[in-house]
């Protein structure tokens, strides 16, 4: 399995100056798998604090970190 990221959007921040092609797989996962990803440190790219807080409340865990870096790219 590749890296796990948490997004609050389907816009994927790829540095296209470095890569000519990227493959992303999106799949519906069980709630338990998502909760575990939130708890165990999937990389959070959620850029809106209320969204992160809602995720924490919905899944009874700490909110994932808020990352609002316009220059952040997945590598």
Image: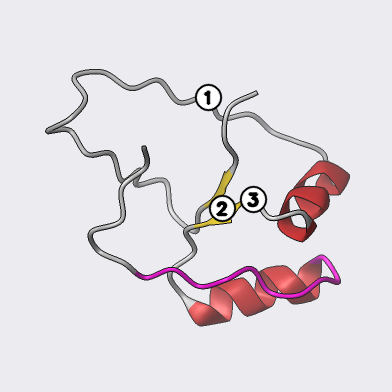
Name the secondary structure under disc 2. Answer: strand
Kindly identify the residue that appears in the image at 87 percent across and 47 percent down.
Answer: 32
Quadrant into which the N terminus falls = top right
Q: Rounded to the nearest whole Å, what is the CA distance between mark 1 and mark 3?
A: 16 Å
Going by the image, does 4 lie left or right of 47?
right
Please state the horizontal and vertical placement of residue 64, each as a whole percent of the image: 64, 68
Q: Rounded to the nearest whole Å, what is the CA distance between mark 2 and mark 1?
A: 16 Å
Kindly identify the residue that appears in the image at 82 percent across and 39 percent down.
Answer: 30
59 or 4: which is nearer to us?
4
Please state the horizontal and vertical placement of residue 68, each as a whole percent of the image: 37, 70
Kindly identify the residue that appears in the image at 69 percent across and 55 percent down.
Answer: 41
Please state the horizontal and vertical placement of residue 5, each as a whole percent of the image: 55, 46
CB under 8 Å between callouts 3 and 2?
Answer: yes
Residue 42 magenta-highlighted: no
CB under 8 Å between callouts 1 and 3?
Answer: no
Q: Main secondary structure of the magenta part?
A: loop
């Amino acid at each position: 399995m590749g890296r796990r990221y948490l997004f609050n959007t389907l816009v994927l921040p790829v540095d296209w100056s470095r890569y000519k092609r990227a493959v992303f797989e999106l799949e519906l996962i069980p709630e338990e798998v998502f909760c575990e990803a939130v708890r165990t440190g999937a990389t959070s790219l959620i850029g809106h604090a209320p969204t992160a807080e809602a995720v924490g409340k919905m899944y009874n865990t700490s909110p994932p970190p808020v990352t609002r870096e316009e220059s952040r790219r997945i590598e």
